[in-house]
Amino acid sequence: MNTIRDTIISGQAVLGVEFGSTRIKAVLIGTDHAPIASGDHTWENRLENGIWTYHMEDVWAGLQDAYANMKKDVLDRYGVKLTRLAGFGVSAMMHGYLPFDKDGNQLAEFRTWRNTITAAAAAELTELLQFNIPQRWSIAHLYQAMLNGESHVKDIAFLTTLEGYVHWKLTGEKVLGVGEGSGMFPVDSEKCDYDQHMLDLVDERIAAKGYAWRLRDILPRVLNAGDDAGCITAQGARLLDPSGDLEPGTPAAPPEGDAGTGMTATNSVAVRTGNVSAGTSVFAMVVLEKPLSRVYPEIDMVTTPTGKPVAMVHCNTCTSDINAWAGMLRGFAEAAGLQVSMNDIYTALFTSALEGEKDCGGVVNMPLVSGEPVVGLEDGRPMMLRTPDAKLTFANFARSLVSGAMASLKLGMDILVQEQVRIDALLGHGGYFKTPGVGQRILAAALNTPISVMETAGEGGPWGMALLAAYRVHHKEGQTLEQYLSDEVFASAKGSTVQPDAADVAGFDAYTARFASALPVQRAACEHLK
């Protein structure tokens, strides 16, 4: 306790903040990289005029509340006021679209990763560049706005992502970590910078449409993990901590997306390692030994925070439908006069899933609350399907919920199996793995791969961002991020590994076949159920 107190008083603690889809969380770590305090703020995206978005005033209100709650946690635990930090980093849900004019005025609503409104742009850019451009990438949103003839495009002076925006306002620096930068525009891993040939190809299209700016004029500068990304200014300190307690001057790490922080938090930044982040959305990332044989629309090519090529399968929906059913079940319990917590509901769902039949007894859950490019859907309608002879028990229902959350991911990951991509270690983190052993076992069955979960998995992205900030200020000359994480952070890490069970694998394969065969039903529901 005294050591931690001294760490805080002397300004040696490091802060990581992450803007997740439903929660903004601030995690403070000590000199041993272990969390010593945290605070969070709950928020939700809005569907406005057909666009999934967040308002910028909600960004700042949420950041300030999460930071204030973390400060209160420090005071309550250690009896001291937080005034100084050794390092800082901000992360957020990946990519999206935030354009500004030369005076810093926001030109359009923040268009998040959840939107599937850029299909035409993504297809045209993928063909032009011979490189898969997903719909959520910033360049896809920009190019779609150009195709739409949106008037604001001519006035763009700066285009960034959510964490790039927050970092800019806190430090004055228009930069991004290379991992998140690779989701704005394709990156050359050898140079850790935007691919110049691809920039030239897109710039020709931009010039042909009559715009005066070029992509390098408006994109953030790309930085490697450990690079100097500026310091929190006096104005930034007040934005983060309106009470005025926080001193300016804290060194900042390059801002990264939740993909990069997830890799960091699971020590999955080395070749042939990978991780699965499973929460509101789910994505798997595998650091490659060599490029894939061809372009796959289901596979995104991004990078680690140090620029290594990564194959990414990203699915827009994971636990949202589980959450919706859990809320309904709690309502049933209350109607029956039972006092049941949400934690009890989730525990019952996940543990009961292991009692269900391996293929869910013919019950199929399609948890698609929005479009899902991996399975070719532009919109979603959550639905539960079953054949007349299906066995609708609570255990089969529960297993279909937990399995359905991973079905789209499996369909994407099967491509990497066909490409003979080698994975030495695959680690899971996020809310899906909170109930011990259950999420691991289902995912091991889905991917037919051992799944490990470390004791730190619950810390997630904000902790990963804090680790990147610690690396920024503490790494030795010549010490790579891979070395820093293995030697300084995870040397004595504890966890568990679940091997795939043959019967579970066969059952999940059967479940996935039913899921895939029902996709036309999902398309029909989107067409007819408005």
Image (cartoon, rainbow, N blue to C red):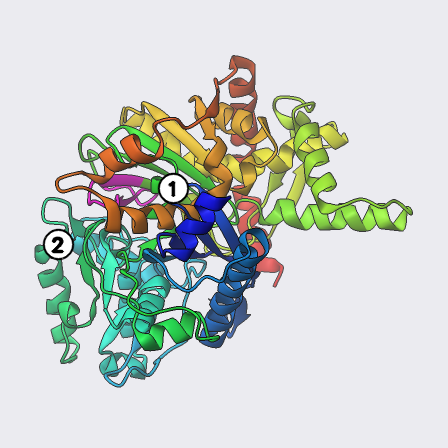
Looking at the image, residue 75 lies above or below residue 308:
below
Q: Which residues are magenta?
A: 295-311
Q: Secondary structure at mark 1?
A: loop
The foreground one among 25 and 131 is: 25
Is residue 285 visible to the viewer in this orientation of the structure? Answer: yes
Number of numbered discs? 2
> Are there few (<14), some (14-19), or many (20+) residues within 10 Å of tag 2?
some
495 vs 226, left or right, is right
440 vs 346, left or right, is left
Question: Which residue corresponds to mark 2?
Answer: 195
Looking at the image, residue 143 lies above or below residue 382:
below
Residue 167 in the image: x percent, y percent? 32, 66
Looking at the image, residue 474 lies above or below residue 162:
above
281 vs 530, left or right, is left
Question: Which residue corresponds to mark 1?
Answer: 33
Looking at the image, residue 505 lies above or below residue 368:
above
- Label of residue 206 in the image: none
> Which amino acid type is shown beneath numbered disc 2?
Asp
Q: Residue at x 9, y 49 (%)?
A: 191
The foreground one among 61 and 82 is: 82
> Which amino acid type is shown beneath numbered disc 1?
His
